[in-house]
């Protein structure tokens, strides 16, 4: 079973000075006995400036060696402060240069993928100008990723990327084998959806989220699963929906608990393991029935 843990899961411990990149690696390997890991760049970047500067090569090589010693795969690096689109051309260029520095870091670390957001904030509208720029940059980065043996792409994380239609438009425009989406299951903006004269129920919201996951599923190469989904009554159905679309990647916990995060992540990981196993079993039973 392909399981991982996203670095943001231990953000509170990082802020409290109780975990750095090396103790994070060791915790995922020793405590949770996993051989795959996700990074969040806050763990190894200079975050004292608006655009977080990547670590120097010496630190990157030490991180790579720590992974190799434990025979761990760096499945994904989620990079903040290197998103693609900003209406200011000078800011866009600075973001582009920062993105290039993280792609180089990913190559040193031998990462399998890099998440670069399409946009940070905004009014949620994907203009033709923004679409053309975003698609061109992702194709450029994907060309480089092809040479390095990894893939690159957005997450439904911020701004217009919280709308499935925007990610579909971007993905269709990029159309590159080394492009993909990091899907945070169920993390979508649903404001403005009409249900007539009634208020949307929790079931309505869950169905909208699952349908949004389906809309982008053909491009999904990695996932983040938060505690809200893990505790949902339809968690297995939500995971099964992605499996039915052909997903065969990693399932990464992203659960930044306020209290006792080590135990909380362990509990969430166990529940995720159970949900994925149940979803896989359902799919196997379905295939046998159809045969």
Image (tube, helix red, strand yellow):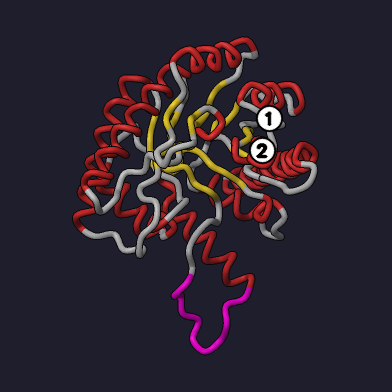
Task: Find out whether residue 197 is within the magenta segment.
Answer: yes
- The prevailing secondary structure element of the residues shown in magenta is loop
**Camera-side residue: 144 or 236?**
144
- Visible in this render: residue 207? yes
Name the image quarter holding the N terminus: top right
User: Contact (CB < 8 A) between labels 2 and 1?
Assistant: yes
- Visible in this render: residue 180? no
Q: Is residue 280 above or below residue 32?
A: below
Quadrant of the image occupied by residue 224 = top right
Furthest residue toward bottom = 197
Q: Residue at x 32, y 47 (%)?
A: 171
Instruction: Give the structural element (helix, strand or loop) at label 2.
Output: helix
Q: What x and y, as percent, mark residue 13?
A: 69, 37
**Camera-side residue: 84 or 175?**
84
Q: What x and y, as percent, mark residue 165?
A: 36, 60
Q: What x and y, as percent, mark residue 239?
A: 60, 49
Instruction: Give the structural element (helix, strand or loop) at label 1.
Output: loop
Q: Name the residue carrying label 2.
A: 10
Q: How many marks?
A: 2
Q: Which is more foreground, mark 2 or mark 1?
A: 1
Could you tell whether 149 is left or right of 76 in the image? left
Sequence-first disc among 2 and 1: 2
Marking on residue 19: 1
Q: Residue at x 39, y 51 (%)?
A: 120
Q: What x and y, as percent, mark residue 153?
A: 38, 39
Could you tell whether 44 is left or right of 70 in the image? left
Furthest residue toward front = 48
Which region is colored magenta? 191-201
């Amino acid at each position: 079973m392909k399981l991982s843990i996203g670095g943001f899961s231990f953000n509170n411990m990082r802020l409290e000075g109780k975990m750095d990149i090396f103790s994070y690696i060791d915790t995922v390997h020793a405590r949770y006995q996993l051989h795959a890991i996700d990074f969040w760049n806050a763990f190894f970047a200079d975050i004292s400036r608006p655009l977080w500067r990547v670590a120097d090569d010496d630190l990157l090589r030490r991180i790579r060696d720590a992974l190799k010693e434990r025979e761990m795969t760096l499945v994904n690096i989620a990079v903040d402060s290197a998103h693609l689109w900003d209406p200011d051309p000078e800011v866009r260029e600075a973001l582009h240069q920062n993105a290039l520095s993280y792609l180089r870091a990913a190559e040193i670390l031998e990462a399998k993928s890099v998440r670069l957001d399409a946009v940070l904030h905004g009014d949620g509208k994907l203009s033709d100008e923004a679409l053309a720029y975003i698609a061109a940059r992702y194709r450029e980065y994907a060309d480089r990723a092809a040479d390095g043996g990894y893939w690159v792409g957005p997450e439904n994380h911020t701004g217009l990327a919280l709308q499935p239609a925007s990610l579909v438009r971007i993905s269709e425009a990029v159309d590159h084998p080394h492009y993909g989406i990091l899907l945070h299951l169920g993390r979508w903006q649903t404001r403005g959806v009409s249900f007539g004269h009634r208020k949307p129920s929790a079931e309505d919201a869950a169905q909208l989220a699952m349908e949004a996951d389906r809309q982008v599923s053909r491009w999904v190469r990695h996932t983040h699963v938060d505690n809200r989904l893990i505790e949902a009554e339809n968690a297995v159905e939500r995971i099964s929906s992605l499996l039915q679309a052909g997903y065969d990647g990693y399932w990464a916990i992203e659960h930044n608990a306020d209290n006792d995060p080590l135990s909380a992540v362990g509990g969430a990981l166990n529940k995720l393991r159970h949900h994925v196993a149940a979803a896989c079993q359902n799919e196997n039973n379905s295939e046998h029935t159809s045969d």
